[in-house]
Image (cartoon, rainbow, N blue to C red):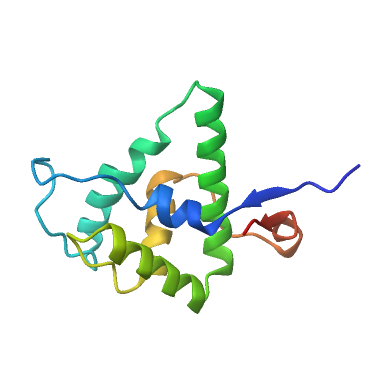
């Protein structure tokens, strides 16, 4: 039996998951969210990230959701200074209307808890070995 491989890309997390075009006319959110506050984080996650995980029927969308989810799981397990730096850089480029959360790792964990409440993100060494980061 061949080794199972799950291709992941941290940019899927930073770009696809974190970013959503935003217009101030969207009434649900204040113009500037203080994202070190857990309630504000939940607002942001539910408003911008969750819609990307609505049940999909289109195979391409199902695949995209799977890649995003597995990339997030991977990032949570290998998060380091470089990832923190990349995440912040992308955030500053693309989300100008709110500061990135000070603890970006905790923010990503919070996103996982809200998006996939019944699934653990922690992986053991064997499971980790299935993940291949594409660059």
Q: Tag count in the figure?
A: 0
Q: Quadrant of residue 32?
A: bottom left
> Residue 112 or 31: which is nearer the viewer?
31
Q: In this view, does 6 lie above or below 79?
A: above
Q: Which residue in the rendered view is the most extreme toward the top? A: 57
Q: In which quarter of the image is the N terminus?
A: top right
Q: Quadrant of the C terminus?
A: bottom right
Residue at (57% x, 34% y) in the render: 63
Residue at (42% x, 47% y) in the render: 16
Residue at (23% x, 64% y) in the render: 35
Residue 113 appears in view: no
Residue at (39% x, 37% y) in the render: 52
Q: In this view, does 116 lie to the left or right of 123?
A: left
Q: Quadrant of residue 27?
A: top left
Q: Where is residue 105 in the image (x, y as percent from the top left)?
A: 42, 68
> Residue 19 or 55: which is nearer the viewer?
19
Q: In this view, does 11 lie to the left or right of 47?
A: right
Q: Position of residue 33 (x, y in %)?
A: 16, 59
Q: Where is residue 5 in the image (x, y as percent from the top left)?
A: 75, 48
Q: Position of residue 84 (x, y in %)?
A: 44, 72
Q: Which residue in the rendered view is the most extreme toward the right? A: 1
Q: In this view, does 105 lie above or below 70?
A: below
Residue 118 appears in view: yes
């Amino acid at each position: 039996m061949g080794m199972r491989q799950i291709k992941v890309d941290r940019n899927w997390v930073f770009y696809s998951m974190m970013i959503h075009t935003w217009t101030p006319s969207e009434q649900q959110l204040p113009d500037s969210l203080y994202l070190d506050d857990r309630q504000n984080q939940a607002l942001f996650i539910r408003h911008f990230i969750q819609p990307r995980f609505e049940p999909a029927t289109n195979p391409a969308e199902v695949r995209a959701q799977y890649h995003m989810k597995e990339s997030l799981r991977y990032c949570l397990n290998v998060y380091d200074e470089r990832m923190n730096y990349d995440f912040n850089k992308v955030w500053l480029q693309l989300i100008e209307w709110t500061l990135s959360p000070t603890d970006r790792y905790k923010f990503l964990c919070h996103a996982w808890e809200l998006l996939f409440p019944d699934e653990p993100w922690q992986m053991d060494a064997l499971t980790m070995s299935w993940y291949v980061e594409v660059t």
